[in-house]
């Protein structure tokens, strides 16, 4: 779900919510939540605008991978991100980025374009993955861009000069000073973070590093699809149960309420977009179906055992869903921003 944050007034339009940070009112909230930060170490953060390095607090982050059935996954015990982090996944993430941009018509909805063009703001991409969103934005706008991810699958040499990638685990706090950023982009991470740390650590940290009048924009998708056939409905239900066993139960629609409860957020706007999958939606529908199929197949290493399926049974089920069932039932994805 995407939420744009801004510090003025609360408004609700159609299905919409949009957010702004009010740092003045959130002091106590942030102070109370700092008790949940842990295992922080000193590090150096490079500021591309000044060319200087500043001492910061950074999470201890060790790059460790494991290989399961030929796919590479992270090996961090406290991270619940179940998709791979290999070249095949980088390719999927790149395709997914441009698919999302085409479906929504743009890369962001917060009212920051003029500020981006002026080049005097800082942007943070949380869970940047391969960095495609950030690299495109940094090529288009002269502002300063920072990306963080627990897996260093982003480019470390060939990249725009106004980009900075940092390998860190958000569950151990953000390695940035208070009010560092004017805009924060947070995409497809909600189903990778247990409810407790999301509420008590991640959300407070996002607010802490967002400057007064800054914007938070979340982009998420529901696990359950609209018009899902029986196979897809069962698969989504099993995945929700699997996530629940890891303490992950929050839905995109919950983000707005959580932000309102902090007392530091105003101007909430929530946009929903229905994305049809399959042949009836032409090229974009086929690409959306292909992307979903690749996601579910990448989750086979955790979902097949959970569902008591063999690898072959699981793969056959996913193929049936995305070659036949979604077309028969006209299934759609519901995305939030």
Image: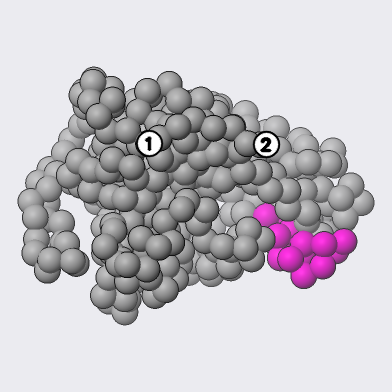
Q: Is residue 320 above or below residue 160?
A: above
Q: How is the image coloured?
A: one colour
Residue under label 2: 14
Of callouts 2 and 1, the N-terminal one: 1
Element type at mark 2: loop
- Please state the total of marks drawn on the protein image: 2
Q: Quadrant of residue 79?
A: top left
Between the C-alphas of marks 2 and 1, the distance is: 20 Å
Residue 289 locus on image (x, y percent): 74, 59
In the rendered structure, the answer to whether residue 317 lies left or right of residue 122 reads right
Residue 197 placement, left or right of 1: left
Q: Specify the segment rendered in magenta.
A: 279-294
Does the magenta run of residues contain 296? no
Which residue is located at x 31 percent, y 50 percent? 182
Figure quadrant of the C terminus: top right
Residue 7 is tagged as: 1
Mark 2 vs 1: CB contact within 8 A: no
Residue neighbourhood size for the residue with mark 2, other residues' Cα within 10 Å, grouped as few (<14), some (14–19), many (≥20): few
- Asked where in the image residue 303 lies, by quadrant, the reply is top right
Kindly identify the residue that appears in the image at 88 percent across and 55 percent down: 327
Magenta: main secondary structure: helix
**Residue nearest the observer in this picture, 208 or 156:** 208
Q: Position of residue 16 (x, y in %)?
A: 61, 38
Give me the disc on residue 124: none
Please report the residue visible at 40 percent of the width from the left and 63 percent of the height from the top.
114
Report whether residue 135 is seen.
no
Residue in view at x 19 percent, y 67 percent: 48
């Amino acid at each position: 779900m995407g939420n744009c944050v801004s510090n003025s007034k609360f408004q609700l339009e159609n299905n919409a919510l949009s957010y702004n940070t009010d740092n003045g009112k959130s002091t106590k909230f942030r102070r109370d939540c700092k008790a949940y930060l842990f295992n922080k170490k000193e590090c150096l953060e490079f500021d591309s605008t000044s060319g200087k390095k500043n001492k910061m607090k950074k999470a201890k982050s060790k790059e460790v991978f494991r290989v399961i059935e030929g796919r590479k996954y992270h090996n961090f015990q406290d991270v619940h991100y179940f998709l791979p982090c290999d070249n095949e996944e980088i390719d999927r993430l790149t395709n997914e980025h441009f698919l999302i941009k085409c479906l929504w018509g743009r890369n962001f909805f917060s009212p920051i374009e003029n500020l981006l063009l002026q080049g005097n703001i800082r942007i943070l991409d949380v869970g940047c993955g391969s960095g495609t969103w950030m690299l495109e934005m940094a090529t288009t706008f002269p502002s300063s861009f920072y990306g963080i991810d627990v897996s260093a699958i982003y480019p470390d040499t060939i990249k725009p000069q106004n980009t900075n990638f940092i390998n860190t685990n958000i569950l151990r706090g953000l390695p940035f000073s208070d009010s560092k950023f004017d805009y924060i982009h947070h995409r497809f991470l909600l189903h990778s973070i247990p409810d407790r740390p999301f509420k008590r650590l991640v959300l407070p940290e996002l607010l802490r590093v967002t400057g007064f009048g800054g914007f938070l924009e979340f982009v998420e998708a529901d696990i359950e699809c609209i018009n899902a056939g029986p196979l897809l409905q069962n698969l989504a239900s099993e995945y929700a149960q699997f996530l629940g066993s890891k303490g992950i139960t929050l839905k995109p629609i919950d983000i707005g309420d959580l932000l309102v409860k902090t007392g530091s957020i105003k101007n909430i706007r929530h946009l929903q977009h229905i994305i049809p999958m399959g042949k009836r939606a032409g090229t974009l529908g086929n690409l959306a179906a292909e992307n979903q199929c690749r996601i579910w197949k990448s989750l086979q290493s955790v979902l097949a055992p959970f569902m008591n399926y063999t690898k072959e049974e699981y793969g056959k089920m996913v193929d049936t869903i995305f070659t036949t069932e979604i077309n028969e039932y006209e299934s759609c994805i519901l995305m939030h921003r």
